[in-house]
Image (cartoon, rainbow, N blue to C red):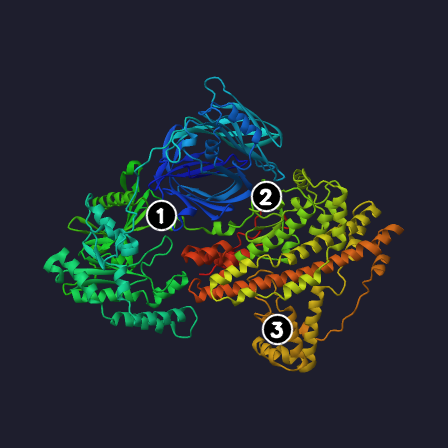
Amino acid sequence: SNDEVTFYGVNSKSECLLVRISRGCNQMADAWIQLKLATGQTYSLMETMDVQQPSEHKCKTFSCGKLQMHYLSPMRRWRIFYCGMLKQVVEDIEKSVFVKFAFLWTASSDVYDCSLHTNPKGFADSMAKSKWKLLFVPPIKRFTDALNFYAQTGVLRGTVSVNDEPEYEMYLFGEKMRNLGESESIVGCKFTTMLGNTPTNGFTFHLSNISARNDFNNLPIGFVIESDGIMATLKDLDVTIKKHATGRTENIFAANFLAGERYELKGKILDTIRLYSSQGWSGSLKLSFIAFEVKNLKGYGLFITGNDYKKPKRTLGFSPCTWFPAIEPPFTVKFTDKISYFREISGGKGASLGKLTQLSKDNEFIVPKGIVVTTSAYDQFLNQNILNAVEYLENVTYGNESGDLKEACNKVSRIVENSLLPSRICNSIAEDLLDIFGEDVNELKFAVRSSTEHSAVMSMAGQMESFLGIQGLHKIFIAVMKCWASQFSHKAVEYKRRNGQVLNSSMAVVIQEMVACEVSGVLFTLHPLTSNPSIITINANYGLGETVMSGAVEPDTVMLRRKENDALELDSVFVGMKDKKMIMLDSGGTTTVELDEDSEDQSCLSEEAALHLGEIAIKIEKHYKYPCDIEWGILEENIYIFQSRHITTAAEVTDYEIKHEFDAPLHCENRYFSVANVGDVMPGAVSTLGLELILKYFNRALQRIIAGQGMVANLFSNKYFSSGMISFYSHLMIAPAELITLNEIETISPKAFMICVFGRILEDSELFENAKTKHKTGSKQTLKRILEHYWHLFTFDFGYEKIRRKIFNHSLNFVRQDTARETFEAVLKTCSDFDDAGLYHTRCTNASSEWKIRLFSILYKAKGSIGADVYHDFSKLVRSPSGFESLSVLKEIQEVANEIVAVIGDKTFSSMSAEEAGKWLLESTLPAGRKFRQFLQKHGHRCIKTDLRSVTWTLDPEPLIRLLQDPAASTKIKAVKEDDSISHIISQLRVPLNFISKCLLRFLVVPQYRRGVKGREAGNALSMKSFDCWRMAYLCLGRQMVSEGRLPDADLIFFLTLDEIKDLLNTRSPKIILRAIHRRKLFPILDRYKFPKIMKGLPKPINEDSETLTNLLPI
């Protein structure tokens, strides 16, 4: 069956990206890349068939050679990465260029599933017109097998770099397509597909016409998404292509189709290319870029035609040994044994040496002989004394027990080193070494190195000890135990703790014959900084390679340029300031000696040797199918290979990706965004976990309200992305055009809404036009709907006490679980417990806003225009009176300050340190202390920011104490009560009001508005308490994960998504922890970003390039 995923995107600059991977058998895969820049330059993949790269989570990842695609959140976010050579055609001349790109795909629609979103009449007609293989038996099974396909629109945001030039940012509108159809069912299939988008308003379509021999004929499948976000299934499609006379490259096409409504589309077909597939299905198709017009709007997309699909041949491909041996692994294995290929047995270094030994038989290099002391031997070596010491070390490392970490590490290392190596292991080591080297084994010198199971993002290289020049079996036994002990060194333990790994992991040891090399070093099959695969980099020094690997000297650096067909030429030679080299001693061990002046000033590696090394490196890379970091040495013109590792730094996540990974999708290029209102309530950046929970909390409430009002499903109802309240750069924002659609556009309501939200009327006609396109389908205003609306308008704050008791008396069962996994499961089970608080908060906010709009409308109608008098009266009527929640908090703080002044005086209290003042307030039996503790009990869940990561007054009362110590707060102030009665305010209004208007304001609108504000304030308090319950839950979870060694510190929990927390509990993936650390590192930068009040297009901070922000990054 097919197993492929395809992404495409276009924009108004005529930029385009198409990437596709189809997974096949035996780790083979098939890939396409078509990249078009605004300059018109196009880049494509030269070799489309390659192997799937190894991955920690294969089900999440699609890979083919240097192209990788994996989902970050199912159906919501993907990452697409490529770093390699692409073909560029300039004036019919092909050349290869280095291209590196990283894109984030974010969903912007619901899913179109071909088997579910059916067009029954169209399907039946197309099937009836075909010639069935079996008379009276319609081919329904083959039909559904062939069309096992789904698609989803989304945006691609990322950067592209060509030949190491500065990164070029792209934002594309398009689609993700997933094909799982049976190959046999599409044999002989013919199709025409059009994919397109109009960036101006977000209109997107996927139109296909498919025919399959004996199954269906001219079947229309696909969908259209209009600017209001509604998806409509394609019912009918007619495509006409008119070819121009010879010599013209452009063809004209027209399409007439029905999807909700009738559409007519006309355009040009440009730049046709042919693409081939060998995995999933076999055949070729034509791909063309198109430019078109629909409803007088310009759009761009792709035109794809294909025919005569064939069933793919089963490829032999790259299929290394995959069956783990069923027998108990031996204590030692030779490099020549195939069982040594398994990392679980030999560790990363040992497995690499086993494979290199096999490869060396057919190539011009030598792998020094040796054996691996397996992980099975390590498990056998462990005794109860070691295990007890390790348990104590784990408790100290994870903070479960007090103690000195360095001393605990030294204790375990000493116990391991001083333990007896079991005779069975000693005998196995001796037998294998004698079998390889004979009686000379005690005269030879060996390197004894640790061999752990490296992952793609976590290498233990440099964390463990290596012992060189070891001579004699007895010393080898001691060195093996020292290698095992080195994983408990303070450096290694800290490295594992920071990456959430278990401290005691099964570990192999490599024992390899040493070679007294004349020159040694390390080679990278791509540029170590830019990851350019056309540059091979060699670092070299005289003697053993340890001086290069450890950075003890500045080595010579030789650059080789790798041309097409892998031809090599010398690019550059840099002679390093190498002043010493390492050599072996005759008596065993190694030493460092000074170099003579002649050796210092010339390259230690000849051009001929460098080119020969490069040729060998290419062969090794082709065998492994990924870029390599190779340790090598030369003795008497023989090249020795000591190690080869997978280079993974090229695919590291960039700062750009971290900044934008949770950005909401644009539905069109001119979409509007604002930080008004929400930026005042929740200023600055929000942590990763806080962002996810807060957006779900408020958007879920908004969805329930809109559903209750009978609104047609649109952008607000989608489950794959946020709308209403959204995020960019981890800052919360709103989409004003979408919110304006909730009001009648042709009335005064939108203007009143803008004044309520933005403080002014926005004079941008395009904003209104944008809003109108999203207002095409609204709720039908029946009498029932009208009555329900007014019912909600007068009952919005009903049920407050019941909700308050539920939230403030929550059992918090999730903080009483024994393990992190149990706590996480308990938290997820209670995730909807706080929905009513969010619903109440949102309902009261909406009601207060609507009454506010009605208040403004009365003033506007009375005056006949919007001017200074209307603004003056409006501001007086909407001023918050005393008695509201936020004002009462300030009042209670003042009362606490007044009590303190009365007891000890403001000067005495202000002179105390925050710690002293806090201790006194928490322990004092005087009225001031009691008042302070009562205040904490009532309002201790509050904090300066709403973010879950923020520290509340209960967790850290210091900010509150400093506020109380402020001279202004500590001085007893006699409150002056202003007359805020409605009748008094109405008597001071400037706008001439008639009797009915005054009555409406006096007895209905203003009282209901104040009631709404009071409800909103109470709802905000409920939300803050709900967030505090989550805060308590995730702090508890973070501490448990630290105590279990899954997180380096509890604060990091706030920089993980819920999906990542689940994965971390299941896998201990260091990749997740590194991503969280990266987010936390950039958080201070994001937090200080400032945005304009309203933005058109992609939001951009006004201070993004500020030097002071850059200086915030930790060193």
Please name the residue that numbered disc 3 is placed on: 961
Residue at the farthest top position: 245
Q: Secondary structure at mark 3?
A: helix
Q: Amino acid at mark 3?
A: Ile
* 929 left or right, relative to 794: left
* 751 left or right, relative to 1085: right
Please name the residue that numbered disc 1 is placed on: 54
Please state the horizontal and vertical placement of residue 715, each as a whole percent of the image.
Answer: 61, 43
Q: Amino acid at mark 1?
A: Pro
Say whether residue 606 is visible. Answer: no
| Residue drawn at 43 percent across, 47 percent down | 60
Q: Earlier in the sequence, mark 3 or mark 2?
A: 3
Distance Cα–Cα, label 3 vs label 2: 43 Å
Using the rendered view, name the quadrant where residue 685 is placed: bottom right
Please state the horizontal and vertical placement of residue 639, each as a whole percent of the image.
Answer: 19, 49
> Which quarter shows the N terminus?
top left
Please state the horizontal and vertical placement of residue 934, each as a whole percent of the image.
Answer: 66, 74
Residue 354 circle label:
none
Residue at the farthest left position: 439
Please name the residue that numbered disc 2 is placed on: 1097
Marks 3 and 1: in contact by CB < 8 Å?
no
Q: Secondary structure at mark 1?
A: loop
Please state the horizontal and vertical placement of residue 763, each as a whole percent of the image.
Answer: 70, 43
- Judging depth in this view, the residue of 708 and 393 nearest the camera is 708
Using the rendered view, name the quadrant where residue 450 is placed: bottom left
Q: Earlier in the sequence, mark 1 or mark 2?
A: 1
**What is the crowding at mark 1: few (fewer than 14 residues within 10 Å), some, or many (at least 20)?**
few
**What is the crowding at mark 3: few (fewer than 14 residues within 10 Å), some, or many (at least 20)?**
many
* 154 left or right, relative to 835: left
Distance Cα–Cα, label 1 vs label 3: 55 Å
**What is the crowding at mark 2: few (fewer than 14 residues within 10 Å), some, or many (at least 20)?**
few
